[in-house]
Amino acid sequence: MPKTVLSMLLAAAFGLASIQPIAAATDERDTFNATKDTRAAEARKKADCDRQARAHHFGVHLGQRSRFLKRCMGAR
């Protein structure tokens, strides 16, 4: 295979690979434009997770509490 064809294939592959991060960034922006109902649902879920974390009595173990909250909220 000539070098020019190979270089064109590589350029096309890298060009297509660079499209995916743009799509991911678009999805990320959609979360900032969440509806009022979505934000309210997230606030209810966070309140429930905070209540569960208080019931665990983590005390001074802030790292454990933080990990628990991330898992409870779905690791946003």
Image (spheres, grey):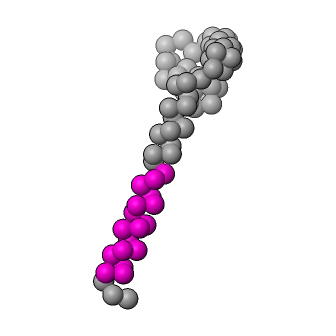
Horizontal placement of 65 versus 51: left or right?
Answer: left
- Decide: is 41 above or below 17: above
- Decide: is 20 above or below 71: below
For the question of whether residue 49 can be seen, the reply is no
Q: Position of residue 31 (x, y in %)?
A: 56, 28
Question: How many marks can you see?
Answer: 0
Q: Quadrant of the N terminus?
A: bottom left
Residue shown at 41% from the left, 67% from the top: 12
Q: Quadrant of the C terminus?
A: top right
Front-lying residue, 38 or 57: 38
For the question of whether residue 7 can be seen, the reply is yes
- Specify the quadrant of the image occupied by residue 36: top right
Q: Position of residue 59 (x, y in %)?
A: 54, 11
Residue shown at 52% from the left, 25% from the top: 32
User: For the magenta stretch, what is the residue range?
Assistant: 4-20
- Magenta stretch containing residue 26, yes or no? no
- Specify the quadrant of the image occupied by residue 38: top right
Residue shown at 36% from the left, 68% from the top: 11
- Specify the quadrant of the image occupied by residue 5: bottom left
- Decide: is 76 above or below 24: above
Q: Residue most toward the left? A: 3
Q: Residue most toward the bottom? A: 1
- Decide: is 10 above or below 44: below
- Magenta stretch containing residue 16, yes or no? yes
Q: Position of residue 69 (x, y in %)?
A: 59, 22
Q: Position of residue 65 (x, y in %)?
A: 55, 20
**What type of secondary structure mainly makes up the magenta span?**
helix
